[in-house]
Image (cartoon, rainbow, N blue to C red):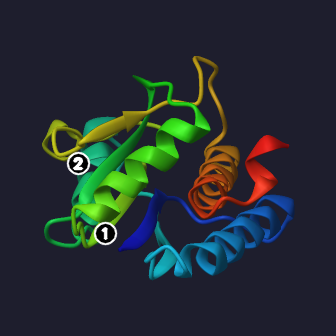
Amino acid sequence: MRIVVAAIGRLKQGPETELSERYRKRASQTGRSLGLRDVEIVEIRESRAEDAGKRMIEESIALANVIPQDAVVVLLDPKGDDLDSEGLASQISRWRNAGTPAAVFVIGGPDGLAATLADKARLRLAFGTATWPHQLVRVMLLEQIYRATTILSGHPYHRA
């Protein structure tokens, strides 16, 4: 199973990019023995439309175009489920065991996502009720994916 993080916006060089790449590489390496083919990041350029509704639609279409057929869609949503690390690991394991070809974690833009894309989400995942910058959400998500792979492989990282 592939894991894809599809995000609106591009990270510039800096600590967020370095941390994101560190956790992506670690998750990919740990995940191989678990049947996870790779952890990929797909960055979608922010829409330049003046109207927020149009930006939301354009970005949602661009995100929908990178979601493979039969993939599980996980939407990062501040009103979503607040899963703990073991819960996320368990969910990834269930999808993998069910033969799901990919799990796509979607980080929308500041205007949100169109309902047509949001309705495809099998899981809405929150990192608490606080508002987080998109750059940090990506780092936290990749860390949690890495943590899930360590939990599934029996590595003690998850106890830290």
Depth-wise, is mark 1 or mark 2 nearer the camera? 1
Which residue sits at x=22%, y=40%? 114
Left or right relative to 131: residue 64: left
Q: Which residue is mark 1?
A: 102
Question: Quadrant location of the C terminus?
Answer: top right
Location of residue 27 by image quarter: bottom right
Q: Which residue, as the protein is rendered here, is positioned at the far top?
A: 129
Left or right relative to 109: residue 153: right
Depicted 121 relative to depicted 65: above or below:
above
Q: Which residue is mark 2?
A: 57
Q: Earlier in the sequence, mark 1 or mark 2?
A: 2
Which residue sits at x=67%, y=64%? 11
The disc labelled 2 sits on which kind of residue?
Ile
Give SS at disc 2: helix
The disc labelled 1 sits on which kind of residue?
Ala
Location of residue 98 by image quarter: bottom left
